[in-house]
Image (cartoon, grey):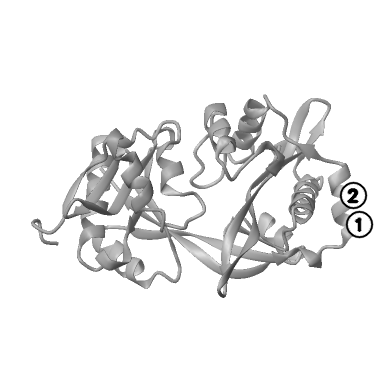
Amino acid sequence: MSKSEYVIRNYNESDFEAFSEAFKQDKRIESPVDRVKRPGISPENNLFIAENGKKMVGYALAEPELSINRIILHCWVQPDHRRKGVARELVNRVINRAEELNVQAVHVDISSNNSIARNELPKLGFKYVRRYLELFLAIEKIPDKDLEKARKECRQLQPGEEEKLSDIQNRAFADHWGYHPNTPETIAYDISLSHRSLQDIVVTCEENSIRGYCWTEIIDIAVESSKEKHGIIYMIGTEPEYRGEGLGKKVLLAGLSYLKSQGIKTVSLSVDSENRIAYELYRSMGFEERGSTLWYEKKLG
């Protein structure tokens, strides 16, 4: 990368409008704009911008998850500026930041179809560590009576229940690889985003306690020359002591029922390939594999 052609620098608060405009092409489910505003991110310290002639052309975010001793790397470069060393320099900035924070590892996830990243990451000291499977379902495969029964046994999350949701998430995923505990503030922020709402989160309760939940999301996907609405199962979990009682299937069916009521016909989700119990549940309900995401790790120190 020519130093005279590209400049890598820290993000400033005054960059927000230009940052939002420059990276709206990054079409991942959680936009970079939403991500940098999440509680605890501190973009002035953890976000790096690549510029070409004063124009933003790439970024890398070191998302700190200090309680589990890691940084998650998010990196994107505009297509016209790829294969010029920009991404490599941005990744190195994140690695340096991780070393400053004295964490044990940097993690990054990529599509299994991203052959360039699969080739370049090992050159920077990253090793493949985990695979997440992308599963797809046409809701019409599920009998309406099953959806209706689950819907009647569940309800939507209510205002003021962010702490309850945070608590059950943290208990449900405490032993899962790579899980970083949530806080009520993070949950409240995620729900406040323009494409999310309390109605998207379906819960099953015992008295006043949430025993299981299914967090859904609706996004636009490109289909030929138009866009269609598509459902995402963002996260699903149950109280550990209630596992084996069918709560996971019930809240999943209730989440699918909600998505169907919103006119959604197709749904996808991501599952750890080593979580065989969850994988078998999804497969038994008709979900099919459509791809995978690979996680890479660079150990530090």
Q: Residue at x 69, y 55 (%)?
A: 277
Q: Whole-percent x and y of residue 55? A: 23, 53
One can see residue 243 in this view: yes
Quadrant in the picture for residue 102: top left
Tell me the residue that label 1 is attached to. Answer: 145
Q: Nearer the viewer, residue 229 or 91?
A: 229
Q: What is the x, y in percent for residue 181?
A: 52, 34
Query: Mark 2: which secondary structure?
Result: helix
Q: Is there a contact, CB below 8 Å, between mark 2 and mark 1?
A: yes
Q: Which residue appears at 75% of the width and 35% of the height? A: 211
Identify residue type, mark 2: Lys
> Vertically, is 279 above or below 242?
below
Given the image, on which type of amino acid does mark 1 rest? Lys
Can residue 102 be seen by looking at this rendering?
no
Rendered location of residue 74, percent (x, y): 37, 51
Which of the pair 69/37 is nearer the observer? 37
How far apart, in angstroms, are the residues tagged by discs 2 and 1? 6 Å
Q: In the displayed structure, does residue 160 sit left or right of residue 207?
A: left
Q: Taking 261 as reference, is 173 left or right? A: left
Q: Is residue 40 above or below residue 202?
A: above
Residue of label 2: 149
How packed mark 2 is, by other alpha carbons closer than 10 Å (few <14, some 14-19, many 20 or more), is: some
Looking at the rendered structure, the secondary structure element under dot 1 is helix
Residue 130 percent coordinates (x, y): 47, 58
